[in-house]
Image (cartoon, grey):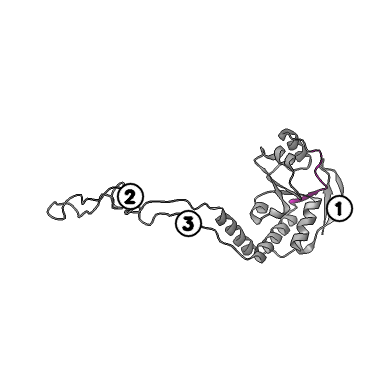
Amino acid sequence: MKVNVYDQMGKMVGEMELAESVFAVPVNEPLVQEVVTMYLANRRVGTASTKTRGEVSGGGRKPWRQKHTGRARAGSIRSPLWRGGGIIFGPKPRDYSYSVPQKVRRAALKMALTAKVNTGEIMVIDHWENIPAKTKDMVGILKKLGVEEKALLVLEAPDETLHRSTRNLKNVKVALYKNLNVYDLLCVSRIVFTRQSILKLQEALV
């Protein structure tokens, strides 16, 4: 499997071969969904909290006597049946995170990459050079590359200038090849790798 390689002005400068063990694997959608669900669960903060009748302040005295009032029995004004009372079975702080085996995560990542290659959403550029620190100039470069939708720029090493020039673009995210996850891949319409980042990714996943 081969893909075209472009410079950052959108001109084709060559080709490179992709590893079929990474970019041409059978896609198992339930497995990919399982990994995405795990990722989203791990992002939940789980801080929602409510008070039970034992935690709400007040209500220590019986509001009226048990019998001969014509009213229903009541033992506390903080009963869940009363306004301002406790909450029945309300949420409590909890940890939603869980994990799936590393082999499953790696397999799902390969499947996501395969799906993106099959739909033509992966693009490879030779390297980034002389990146302007201005957002406006970066928008022009992305247009020359044909990247006008939600995109993920994958690097082999941190690049502070590239990060500064894209941080105000809400539809562009920059990530290192070693930090890629299935959710980020599936949430974008274009993935722009540098030649070195895709080579290192292949080495890590083969």
Residue furthest left in the image = 68
Q: x and y percent of residue 85 in the render?
A: 31, 49
Write the residue at 43% across / 55% down: 92
* Disc 2/disc 1 C-alpha distance (Å): 68 Å
Q: Nearer the viewer, mark 1 or mark 3?
A: 3
Write the residue at 73% across / 59% down: 114
- The answer to whether marks 3 and 2 mark residues whose Cβ atoms lie closer than 8 Å is no
Q: x and y percent of residue 82 in the render?
A: 28, 49
44 sits to left or right of 7: left
The image's mark for residue 56 is 2
Which of marks 1 and 2 precedes in the sequence?
1
For disc 1, the marked residue is 15
- Identify the image quadrant of the N terminus: bottom right
Write the residue at 73% across / 37% down: 139
Q: Amino acid at mark 1?
A: Glu
Q: x and y percent of residue 39 in the render?
A: 59, 56
Q: Amino acid at mark 3?
A: Arg
Q: Nearer the viewer, mark 2 or mark 1?
A: 2
24 sits to left or right of 90: right
Q: Amino acid at mark 2?
A: Val
Part of the protein shown in magenta: 121-130
Which of marks 3 and 1 precedes in the sequence?
1
Residue 183: quadrant of the picture: bottom right
Q: Is residue 26 above or below residue 12?
A: below
Q: Main secondary structure of the magenta part?
A: loop
For disc 3, the marked residue is 94
* Disc 3/disc 2 C-alpha distance (Å): 20 Å
| Secondary element at tag 2 | loop
* Residue 100 is a magenta residue: no
* Residue 127 is a magenta residue: yes
The answer to which of 132 and 145 lies nearer the viewer is 132
